[in-house]
Image (cartoon, helix red, strand yellow):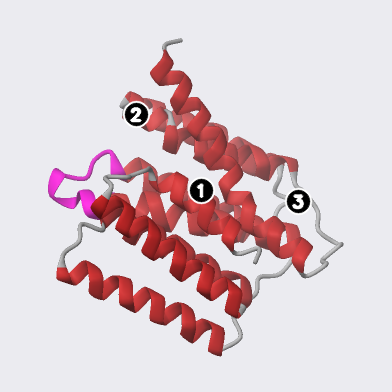
Amino acid sequence: MDKLKSKRLLAALIEFISYHIFPFIFIFVHDLNNYSIHGFLIIMVAMVALYKEFILTLNPNKYFHILYSGIYLLLALLSIHSLNLFVTILVFAQLIFLYMIKYLPESYQNLASLVEDFVVPSFMSIALAFTYMHFISVNFVVPLLLVNLATVMINYFEGTRFDYIQLTAISALSLILFLLNYISLWTALAIIVFIVTMSLLKKYRNFSQSNLFYRVIGNLILVI
């Protein structure tokens, strides 16, 4: 296996872990000791991460998609009595979204990036949180969406006037969420510092990383 494929497999593993970061942070910060881990869900989530970071780069055809979906549906059937149907459908929907990316024309690449870097990671974490905690909370969803949206903004930051307006808006949104008691003051400040620092490093030091890199850091910030 060449070095590039090894890196993509490592990225898939980190992607898989990234989906779990904030759910576990939320569980332990709020002392939710009744959480449970579902083996079939772990495999399903791993399938999404593997497809997103590794298989998609291999340009799979429709026959592979049928086979891959068949494996997923088999897992769904085996877990039908132990896994919430909503979660099963939600995770499968993310897989379908990733299938669709392959067929989007070049002019829709911004939409493809939004799906890959915001929609899929956000809903994967929500699916995991719902399964682990047996409920979903606005206090979980709102900070998660904020951080994932912020990381997408960093990826698109080029230093234009509109980019700085977006930077100001996301910073203001962080403070608003603090005032609404969705996040702590320290978390809000950490998010703002993170967004501004990464954006300026990208602009003035050409320090640019993958969305996965920013997303892992952003989710870890939520522990503050």
- Residue 141 located left or right of residue 205: right
Name the quadrant of the C terminus.
Answer: bottom right
Give the residue type that dot 2 points to: Thr
Q: Residue at x 38, y 56 (%)?
A: 198
Which numbered disc, 2 or 3, marks the residue that appears first in the sequence?
2
Q: Residue at x 31, y 27 (%)?
A: 59
Residue under circle 3?
A: 81
Asked whether the residues under the numbered discs 3 and 1 touch, taking CB atoms below 8 Å apart as contact, a structural biologist would say: no
Majority secondary structure of the magenta segment?
A: helix
Badge 2: how crowded within 10 Å, few (<14), some, or many (20+)? Answer: few
40 to 27, vertically: above or below: above
Q: Which residues are magenta?
A: 101-112
Give 216 or 130, whichever is nearer the viewer: 216
Which numbered disc, 3 or 1, marks the residue that appears first in the sequence?
3
Residue 142 visible to the viewer: no
Q: Secondary structure at mark 3?
A: loop
Mark 2 or 3, closer to the camera: 2
Give 113 or 160, whichever is nearer the viewer: 160
223 to 105, vertically: above or below: below
Give 190 or 166, whichever is nearer the viewer: 190
Residue 199: image location, x then y, percent: 32, 58
Q: Secondary structure at mark 1?
A: helix
Quadrant of residue 149 within the rendered picture: bottom left
The numbered dot on residue 92 is: 1
Asked whether the residues under the numbered discs 2 and 3 touch, taking CB atoms below 8 Å apart as contact, a structural biologist would say: no
Separation (CA) of disc 2 from disc 3: 34 Å
Residue 133: image location, x then y, percent: 75, 63
The numbered dot on residue 57 is: 2
Give the residue type that dot 1 points to: Phe
